Structures are given as structure tokens and as C-alpha cells.
Image: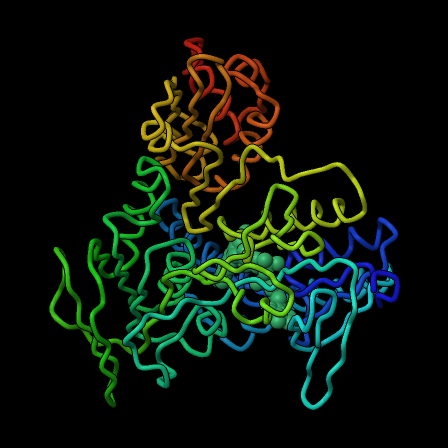
Amino acid sequence: AETDADCDVVVLGSGPGGYSAAFRAADLGLKTILVERHAALGGVCLNVGCIPSKALLHTAHVIDEAAAMAEHGVSFGEPQIDLDKLRGFKQSVVDKLTGGLVGLAKQRKVEVVHGHAEFSAAHSVQVTQGDDSRQIRFRHAIVAAGSRTLRLPGLPDDDERIIDSTGALELRDIPSRLLVIGGGIIGLEMANVYAVLGSSVDVVELSDGLVPGADPDLIKPLTKRMKARLGHIWLSTKVTAVTPDDDGLTVSFEGEQAPEPQTYDKVLVAVGRRPNGDQINAQAAGLEIDERGFIPVDRQMRSNVPHIFAIGDIAGQPMLAHKATHEGKVAAEVIAGHKTAFDARCIPSVVYTDPEVAWVGMTEQQAKAQGVDYDKGQFPWAANGRSLGMAYQDGVTKLLFDKSTGRLLGGGAVGPNAGELVAEMGLAIEFGADAHDIGLTIHAHPTLSESVGMAAEAAAGTLTDLY
Ligand code: FAD
């Protein structure tokens, strides 16, 4: 019955979605239990996703920059890489954050229960750890069970030389020959790390460009840099077989650019992620899961069962941490009785490679496909003094404005720190800013952010000053 619930809210999963939801619920006075099957809190993002990958990408970036200094008259020796120490650094960053979550949960009196949670009825979940099992009755549930790596059918599943992003982040060794299957964000970030650490890396991608879905104008400088850094990039090509033998994994390809079979020491599969909707015994609660494993929700993050909510990767695309945290807060607030909904106009995407690529809102391809009339403002970083001082000439900042309202529809950039630049574009979209609003905002000189102001001025026709 409603009244004999053990808690107001049970949250399944402690990733960015789950912990944000649990913390917000507790802050709003709700008795909250957070269930996590792993020992560490923080989910994929903190343990085997966003955070460790960025720690390694930072290292790769510094190695790259140091090597590039030779052209400016400053030479460093060959990098000496102590893998144990590097792994230790990465893990220390992860531990700091996941340990911090334990403290934050305690402060708020969020009870953390470790174990695998499955629904046992509409108002209860069973949490199992080893031989122990416990029922938690709840008034409301927030499912934040996240996603897992998608496996490529037909590949041997017992060969430890075939790894996923989690295996790649373990950094056990630096293979001399690495194949990355999948030229999306995760595949390219890992390719970037391993190439700089010394592997010879090839990338194979099924579609006709890297980072499918992103604006090709922004991907072009990344592809150029990746071509210089990597061995081969094969587009419109698929892997048909991986044959293990003693001296490596022999990979066969099919497609327009398909090479002859190649042999690698390791193969990283980065072909996408699938939601964990099939692992929570959803039917016991009458909870609907779609054929891909997502839980369909409305703008209040409510599922087909009115007292059960879903957030983060399990609630649909885009599978990004900042979307999950935002949705987590919405779900908690709705449960606390607030009249709120997920109402963001845009969710930024960032590829943390070197150079970075980032965009927010509508891409030019989407505007064209939807028949939206737009004005485009573009600014090349070859005319940005700060970028030149950083020895980078290939950057671009691009903004699209709605022709009928004048408002910013979308924007993006490629170049160092592009991920930081899209924050301003996101704010402009949320505030309904037009090209004059952005162009008349004074950006500090010399900064990369000036390229945003200048792209806006280019669209408004008021651009005069360069450098
Ligand atoms: P998750 O983080 O997946 O957390 C779900 C949690 O639920 C897990 O801890 C899991 O153990 C637990 N769980 C699942 N089922 C159960 C159950 N039945 N019982 C108990 N516990 C359960 N996103 C970004 O925004 N920026 C990035 O830079 C970025 N980099 C990434 C790099 C990599 C290599 C990967 C793999 C992902 C990256 N992502 C990034 C994606 C990001 O990690 C996810 O979008 C984010 O973690 C989703 O959060 P979530 O709360 O939905 O779920």
C-alpha cells in the first residue's frame, strides 16, 4: 500500500542521472534510496567513460603539444611513458570523484544500497548481492540504469585482445597495431589517446564520414589531423570477420575502400551503446520497454507507469552525461510535486579529440532537411590571433540563424577548446539571442571566444575587424 513504503523514491543506478536525481530528491525532503550494483558510485561516466577518457586525452594533448614545439625552436626528448603511473593518475581522478559522491550522499542522508535491482511488483524492487536479497518498497521509482557497450555480432567473444572502451581505458599495454571499429566519438577519442601513446592505429567506419551526425564542415579539420596522426581511416567500410591466431587478430573488411585483410595486436569495438532496459525485470512493474531497450518517457520523464520515471541513457538519445543529470533533476522535482518538465532547447555535443569538435542546436544538415531558412555566419580561426599564437590555423566557428526570427538556431566549432565555446552558443539559443545580441557582446581579446562574436557579426553583416 502507498503508506507502508520503505521510501518515497528509489533510484536504480548511480550514474550522473541517478545520483543527480537522488540528491535532488533528498534536497526536496523525500526519503531516498539509491541502488547501485557496483562498489563504486558514479556509473559509466565517472568510472569508465567521460572522466577517465578525458584524463588520458589531456595526457595525449600535452605529449602532442610538446612534440609540436620543435617547430618553434623548443625541443623535448622522446616521451618516456610509465604506464603504471599514468594509469594511477587516471584512477586517482576517478577515485576523487566517486569518493566525493559517497560523502555527498551521506550529507543528504541518501541511503546507498549495493546490489542488482529488479522490479518485483509495481511498488517494489528486489536488490540482490551475492546470497543476500532485500525488498525495497517505494512510492516512486527513477530508473537510471544506463547503457552498455554494443557488441559486434560474429566476433569471437572470448578473446581478450578484442576490447571495448572499458578495456581500452584500462590501459594494460600500448599495442603496436590497434584497429578501432567505429569512427564515432568514443572510437576517435580512444584512437587519439593510443596513437599519441605510440600505437599504430587504423580506424574503420561504416558510414561515409567520421562522427556521423556532426556537421561535415566541422569534421573536416578533425579528419585532416586524424589522417596525419593515424595509419589508415577506411570509410564506408565494414568489418566482416576477425580471426584470432597466435600472432594477432586478422581482420577482413568489405566496402568501397576495403583493404586486404590486416593483422592487429588488439581490436577496439566502439560501435555504439545499448540501454539496459532488459536487465531490470520491467514487466513485473508493468513498465514498457521499447524494442531497442529504451524506456519511453514524456517530458516529465514519466514512463507508462505514472509513479515510475526513467532518465539518462536508458530514456533515449543522446546518450550524454549532461542530459542525464538534467533529466534526473526534472524527475526528482516532478515527484516532489513541482510543475516542471524537461524544457531544454538544446543539448551540446563535444568530441574531445585534438582538435576538439563541438556543436549545439541545429546543424546545417538538419536545417536543410527540415526546410528551415537560415543565415550562416562563419569565422575561420586562421584570422584569430589567439589561435595562431597557439599554432592552430584550421579552426572554424559557425553559427546558423533563423531567417524569419533572427534567432540563433545552432552553432559549432572545431579547434582547441571548442567544447568550451559552445557553452555561449547554448546560452544564446536558450535566451533566444540573435546575431546582433551576440555580435554586440564584447568578447575579450585575444581569445578563441572572439570567433563566436565574429561569426555572429559575419551573419549580421557588421564584421569589420580581424585578428
Ligand atoms: P550510467 O552512467 O550508465 O549509470 C548507470 C548505473 O546503473 C551504473 O553504475 C550501473 O552499474 C547501474 N545499474 C544498471 N543496472 C542496474 C541494476 N539493475 N541494479 C543496480 N544498478 C544498476 N558523456 C558525456 O556527456 N561526455 C563525455 O565525455 C562522455 N564520454 C564517454 C566516454 C566513454 C568511453 C563512454 C563509454 C561514455 C561516455 N559518455 C560521455 C556517455 C556517458 O558516460 C553516459 O551518457 C552517462 O554515463 C549516462 O548516465 P546514466 O546515469 O544514464 O547511466
Which quadrant of the structure image shows residue 19?
bottom right
Q: Residue at image x 44%, y 62%?
A: 273
Q: Nearer the viewer, residue 26 or 1?
A: 1
The image quarter containing residue 94 is bottom right
Please, is residue 145 above or below residue 453 in the view?
A: below
* In this view, 435 is above or below 262: above
Residue, x 14% and y 61% (percent of image)?
258
Quarter where residue 220 is shown: top left
**Of residues 141 and 84, the one drawn nearer to the viewer in this rendering:** 141
Closer to us: 26 or 142: 142
Please provide percent x and percent y for residue 259.
13, 64
Does residue 170 appear to the left or right of 199 in the view shown? right
Q: Residue at x 73, y 87 (%)?
A: 132
- Tell me, yes or no, if residue 185 can be seen here: yes
Q: Is residue 181 above or below residue 317?
A: below
**Closer-to-camera residue (236/172):** 236
Question: In this rendering, would 392 be left or right of 340?
Answer: left
Residue 1, x across and y down, in percent: 83, 65
Whether residue 89 is visible here, answered yes or no, is: no
Task: Dividing the image into four quarters, tell me where ligand 1 lies.
Answer: bottom right
Quadrant of image for the C terminus = top left
